[in-house]
Image (tube, rainbow, N blue to C red):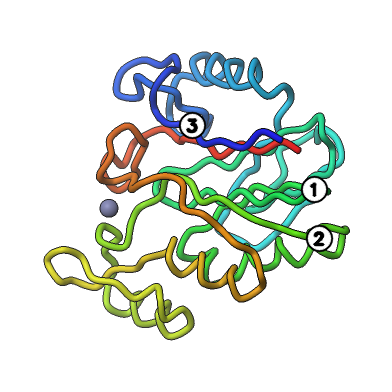
């Protein structure tokens, strides 16, 4: 089992990226991205990324797919295949059991469409028994300022998502809400990294707009 989160440091890139960006869709030099991905491949071997769309599609991969799956969650039981979720403020959620692993992208939309719970349900259908999880670097409840309407929509369904910024404006605490939602289905989750906006060792879309993506990586 290998399960970890990358940050900005240690990669190859030019200019403002100057870091370990793993995403090919954010305007970074593609040759650099390929070098960054090669560095990841050195550690974990073949890995599957997804084209994340804030949807609720969960894709099971048994082998290296011919095309990048359009999905926000990947599941595999293949011990030779690592799964990767790429983020810059959204939550990278990694789920594991003895039988299967999953990588899940959970933003505000993903909290609302229950992508994490759908992934857990599918893992159980496929035979996963005891599932646990880790949440990697994500924007925190004091930094993720949102309009009142979005705050009210999300906290109507996930009470624990309701938060305030340090200056008292409406905010959402997605990690806290996600941990609570997963606890309800008996999946214990640890928050294993800090806030992307506050800690500049991470990429943050809110902080930089044009920026790279760090990754959550898991392998059975
Ligand atoms: Zn923060």
Q: Distance between the residues labelled 3 and 1?
A: 23 Å
Where is residue 67 shown, x and y percent of the image?
Answer: 76, 36
Q: Which of 218 and 87 is in front in this view?
A: 218
- Which residue has dot 3 on it? 6
Nearer the camera: disc 3 or disc 1:
1
**Number of other residues with Cα within 10 Å of mark 2, as a class: few under 14, some 14 to 19, many 20 or more:** some
Q: Which of marks 3 and 2 is nearer the N terminus?
A: 3
- Give the residue drawn at x 72%, y 21%: 45
Which residue is the extreme one toward the left?
A: 167
Tell me the quarter of the image containing the N terminus: top right
Quarter where residue 165 is shown? bottom left
Where is residue 219 shown, x and y percent of the image?
Answer: 71, 36
- Which residue has dot 1 on it? 98
- Which residue has dot 2 on it? 129
Quarter where residue 117 is shown? bottom right
Instruction: Provide the secondary structure element on which disc 1 rests.
Output: loop
Instruction: Provide the secondary structure element on which disc 2 rests.
Output: loop
Q: Which of marks 1 and 2 is nearer the N terminus?
A: 1
- Is the CB–ligand 1 distance for label 2 below 8 Å? no
- Give the residue drawn at x 81%, y 60%: 129
Q: Are marks 1 and 2 in contact (CB under 8 Å)?
A: yes
**Number of other residues with Cα within 10 Å of mark 1, as a class: few under 14, some 14 to 19, many 20 or more:** few
Instruction: Provide the secondary structure element on which disc 3 rests.
Output: loop
Q: How far apart are marks 3 and 2 (CA)?
A: 28 Å
Left or right for 56, reference 108: right
Tell me the quarter of the image containing the C terminus: top right
- Give the residue drawn at x 81%, y 29%: 80
């Amino acid at each position: 089992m290998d399960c970890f989160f990358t940050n900005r440091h240690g990669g190859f890139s030019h200019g403002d990226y100057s870091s370990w960006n793993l995403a090919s869709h954010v305007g970074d030099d593609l040759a650099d991205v390929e070098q960054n991905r090669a560095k990841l491949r050195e550690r974990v071997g073949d890995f599957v990324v997804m084209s994340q769309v804030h949807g609720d599609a969960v894709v099971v991969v048994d082998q290296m797919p011919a095309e990048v799956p359009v999905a926000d969650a990947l599941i595999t039981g293949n011990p030779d295949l690592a799964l990767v979720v790429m983020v810059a403020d959204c939550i990278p959620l990694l789920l594991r059991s003895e039988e299967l692993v999953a990588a899940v992208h959970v933003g505000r939309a993903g909290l609302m469409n229950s992508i994490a719970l759908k992934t857990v349900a599918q893992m159980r259908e496929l035979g996963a028994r005891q599932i646990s999880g880790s949440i990697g670097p994500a924007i925190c409840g004091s930094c993720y300022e949102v309009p009142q309407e979005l705050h009210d929509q999300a906290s109507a369904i996930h009470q624990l998502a309701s938060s305030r910024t340090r200056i008292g404006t409406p905010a959402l605490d997605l990690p806290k809400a996600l941990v609570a939602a997963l606890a309800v289905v008996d999946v214990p989750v640890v928050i294993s990294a800090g806030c992307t906006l506050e800690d500049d060792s991470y990429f943050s879309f809110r902080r930089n707009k044009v920026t790279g993506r760090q990754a959550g990586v898991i392998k059975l």
